[in-house]
Image (tube, rainbow, N blue to C red):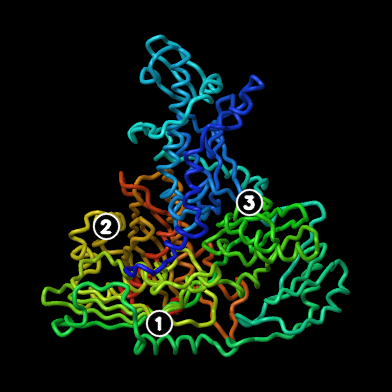
């Protein structure tokens, strides 16, 4: 991105809602806390030096967390950071999830959003600083009480000790004096060699509640007088309601109201099944709009035409790719296509709203509580301080729960009927009314020089823009180049002297959104698959070929080498097994994967083993890193083998898990995760495990069958 006036998704998130300044509130709160306000009563129940930390009289720590927990482990990892820097034992730590609060803005976005694998990257240093400041306040309180210098005292396990005099005091006994102190602006952070919790496997704080059923997800919310609603939306993307006959629906026992919403019709009832029955009884005439003729075939045709003849915008240009083509001794050209993909979160979309004259309470799992508060204020006409967001756990997010359509449903219906309403989407709604991972078409060519290395690389990407849709919703012009369309292609790590990466925007009428690893999910497949094609054309082992192009990037080379070593690259695999390798950097982390694959005589692909090496910088919880790599591999493998949302007559073909297939447990490969030791700044782990798996599998299929996979999903293939 080189244009000064362009606005990519990261810039948008950094600047939207002018929330950047609010971050200072969270990490630099004055000590006018509940502890100080209670001093007049002669007691201090707990110490709250900033928005994130509450230390109780008994020495226990509660970490207040404004990031969404959707299985990625942030409730635990963020608490680990605070506990270690504060010197409080892990068994005395708990968490409190908070709703919309500008004090909890993501430092990398400037607003309260969970996504882009940014939580640890964004909060690692600020949380350490906040906790270190609290620790120094408590130590200073002890030193002042004993008449010694703070440097002579040491904090450990929730106590402050003065070795020279043998005195010690629990944190809880030092609150009143600590509450009178000003937090230091630049507290001294612990040396990483002294970490006791960070870098060690820690038991998840939310595991027990999820295991015994006491954990509350959005779909579990219960309120007095709560009604349940279902929404009917147009079968064609962008269609609108023309006419509604609701007589039969209103006659269904339990149905309380039918509410036209323009984009659809809501049925509100006293139970889910009554709402569902009323929905089925509706008779709706639709204005299908301009997308009724759109199909997968028409989209593919338009993309292919645009790739061949469209005017691309340069997303990366180094050297002279066009001028170098005539100098290549061998040129390879290919075309790749990846389909639309649904998010398919395990918990279907839902949200609850209670709109009253005196305020609005909303309940559910959102990746963007600040946006939820904003849209509720817009719909109700109330100021944001009258909107209270109650954050629950999320049964999967992957970018889908950063959207506001299901939130809007609940608020509109509660406002219309004057009672609390929970909207529940069915799995069919979830699959057919998603904001999908964009379909993407790539036309790519590269030439080998006399030394067998790439001389030029020309990659043209055709897809629709996520940020064009998101930008329209928030009223700003789209960027000249959408970063989410080209990321992973415009920053390939390999040493190639002449590179041209172009983007052709081709809108389809199909709504698109952020999907786990976003643009990397398709660019990694193309780049790493095509690199294998070049290695084959050069007559060089694909691992050795990559090594030769990474000589100047020791960090990425180390990750590639680790994956190859642990997979036994260079040794002969078992009979019928072939190996493929891929490496990709995304969200501040480098991941290399080796897939071991077999293909049956009937063309069924069986992924037997995946070896994953990851350098995500400094690690907070190794167990979480491994889990997220494993989860990313499953997510990406499902998409590679089966994932596809087809389009017919302007709507989605797939409806449920019967035809939008998920990887079954008996298809799960053995996964090994190897974490590179590192002192670099933390990288993300929620998304980087997904991009390399599809090309690793495709490359393994080629190694075993000689067949190139250039179109996903892989499905059933033939040998030869």
Q: Is residue 698 left or right of residue 35?
A: left
- Of tags 3 and 2, which is closer to the observer? 3
Q: Which residue is mark 2?
A: 556
Q: Find the distance from the CA under tag 1 to the CA under tag 3.
A: 47 Å
Among the two numbered marks 3 and 2 on one chain, the one whose residue lies closer to the N terminus: 3
The mark found on residue 718 in the picture is: 1
Q: Find the distance from the CA under tag 3 to the CA under tag 2.
A: 38 Å
Quadrant including the N terminus? bottom left
Q: Tell me: residue 481, above or below residue 418.
A: below
Are there few (<14), some (14-19), or many (20+) residues within 10 Å of tag 2? many
Among the two numbered marks 1 and 2 on one chain, the one whose residue lies closer to the N terminus: 2
Secondary structure category for the residue under label 2: helix
- Of tags 1 and 3, which is closer to the observer? 3
Q: Quadrant of residue 343?
A: bottom right
Q: Which residue is mark 3?
A: 392
The mark found on residue 12 in the picture is: none
Residue displayed at 36% across by 58% down: 611
Q: Tell me: residue 15, above or below residue 302.
A: above
Visible in this render: residue 458?
yes
Quadrant including the C terminus? bottom left
Q: Nearer the viewer, residue 537 or 61?
A: 61
**Image position, residue 38 (x, y; %):** 63, 26
**Image position, residue 447 (x, y; %):** 20, 79
Among the two numbered marks 1 and 3 on one chain, the one whose residue lies closer to the N terminus: 3
Q: Is residue 697 left or right of residue 16?
A: left
Q: Is residue 243 left or right of residue 97?
A: right
**Image position, residue 715 (x, y; %):** 46, 77
């Amino acid at each position: 991105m080189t244009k000064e006036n362009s606005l990519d998704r990261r810039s948008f998130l950094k600047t939207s809602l002018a929330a950047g300044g609010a971050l200072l509130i969270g990490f630099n709160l004055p000590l006018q806390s509940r502890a100080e306000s209670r001093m007049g009563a002669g007691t201090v129940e707990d110490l709250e030096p900033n928005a994130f930390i509450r230390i109780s009289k008994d020495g226990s720590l509660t970490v207040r967390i404004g990031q969404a927990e959707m299985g990625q482990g942030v409730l635990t990892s963020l608490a680990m950071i605070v506990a270690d820097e504060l010197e409080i034992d892990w068994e005395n730590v708990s968490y409190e999830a908070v709703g919309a609060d500008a004090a909890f803005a993501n430092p990398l976005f400037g607003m309260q959003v969970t996504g882009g694998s940014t939580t640890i990257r964004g909060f690692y240093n600020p949380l350490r600083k906040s906790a270190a400041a609290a620790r120094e306040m408590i130590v200073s309180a002890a030193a002042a009480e004993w008449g010694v210098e703070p440097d002579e005292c040491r904090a450990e396990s929730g106590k402050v000790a003065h070795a020279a005099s043998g005195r010690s005091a629990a944190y809880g006994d030092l609150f009143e004096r600590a509450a009178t102190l000003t937090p230091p602006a630049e507290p001294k952070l612990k040396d990483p060699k002294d970490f006791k919790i960070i870098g060690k496997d820690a038991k998840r704080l939310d595991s027990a509640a999820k295991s015994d059923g006491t954990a509350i997800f959005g779909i579990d919310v219960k309120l007095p007088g709560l009604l349940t609603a279902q929404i009917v939306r147009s079968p064609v993307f962008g269609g609108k309601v023309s006419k509604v006959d609701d007589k039969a629906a209103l006659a269904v026992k339990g149905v309380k109201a039918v509410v036209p919403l323009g984009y659809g019709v809501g049925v509100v009832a006293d139970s889910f099944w009554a709402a569902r029955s009323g929905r089925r009884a509706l008779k709706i005439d639709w204005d299908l709009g301009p997308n009724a003729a759109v199909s997968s075939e028409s989209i593919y045709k338009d993309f292919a035409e645009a790739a061949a003849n469209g005017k691309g915008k340069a997303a990366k240009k180094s050297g002279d790719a066009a001028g170098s083509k005539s100098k290549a001794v061998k040129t390879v050209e290919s075309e790749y296509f990846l389909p639309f993909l649904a998010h398919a979160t395990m918990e279907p979309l839902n949200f609850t709203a209670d709109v009253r004259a005196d305020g609005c309470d909303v309940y559910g799992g959102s990746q963007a509580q600040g946006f939820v508060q904003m849209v509720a204020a817009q719909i109700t006409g109330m100021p944001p301080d009258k909107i209270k967001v109650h954050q629950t756990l999320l049964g999967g997010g992957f970018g889908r729960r950063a959207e506001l359509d299901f939130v809007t449903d609940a608020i509109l219906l509660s406002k219309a009927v004057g009672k609390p309403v929970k909207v529940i989407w069915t799995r069919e709604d979830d699959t057919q009314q998603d904001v999908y991972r964009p379909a993407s078409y790539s036309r790519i060519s590269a030439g080998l020089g006399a030394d067998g290395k790439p001389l030029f690389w020309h990659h043209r990407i055709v897809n629709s823009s996520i940020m064009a849709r998101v930008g329209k919703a928030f009223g700003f012009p789209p960027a000249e180049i959408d970063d989410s369309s080209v990321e992973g292609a415009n920053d390939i790590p390999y040493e190639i002297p002449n590179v041209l990466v172009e983007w052709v925007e081709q809108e389809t009428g199909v709504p698109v959104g952020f999907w786990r690893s976003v643009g990397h999910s398709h660019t990694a497949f193309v780049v790493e698959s095509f690199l294998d094609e070049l290695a084959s054309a050069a007559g060089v082992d694909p691992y050795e070929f990559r090594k030769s192009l990474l000589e100047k990037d020791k960090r990425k080379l180390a990750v590639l080498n680790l994956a190859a070593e642990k997979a036994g690259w260079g040794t002969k695999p078992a009979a019928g097994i072939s190996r493929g390798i891929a490496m990709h950097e995304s969200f501040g982390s480098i991941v290399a994967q080796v897939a071991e694959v077999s293909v049956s005589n009937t063309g069924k692909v069986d992924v037997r083993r995946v070896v994953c090496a990851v350098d995500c910088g400094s690690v907070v919880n190794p167990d979480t890193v491994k889990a997220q790599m494993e989860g990313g591999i499953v997510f990406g493998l499902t998409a590679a083998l089966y994932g596809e949302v087809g389009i017919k007559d302007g709507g989605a073909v797939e409806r449920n898990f019967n035809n939008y297939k998920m990887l079954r447990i008996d298809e799960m490969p053995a996964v090994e995760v190897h974490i590179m030791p590192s002192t670099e700044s933390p990288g993300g782990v929620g998304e980087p495990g997904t991009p390399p798996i599809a090309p690793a599998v495709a490359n393994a299929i080629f190694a075993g069958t000689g067949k190139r996979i250039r179109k996903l999903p892989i499905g059933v293939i033939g040998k030869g």
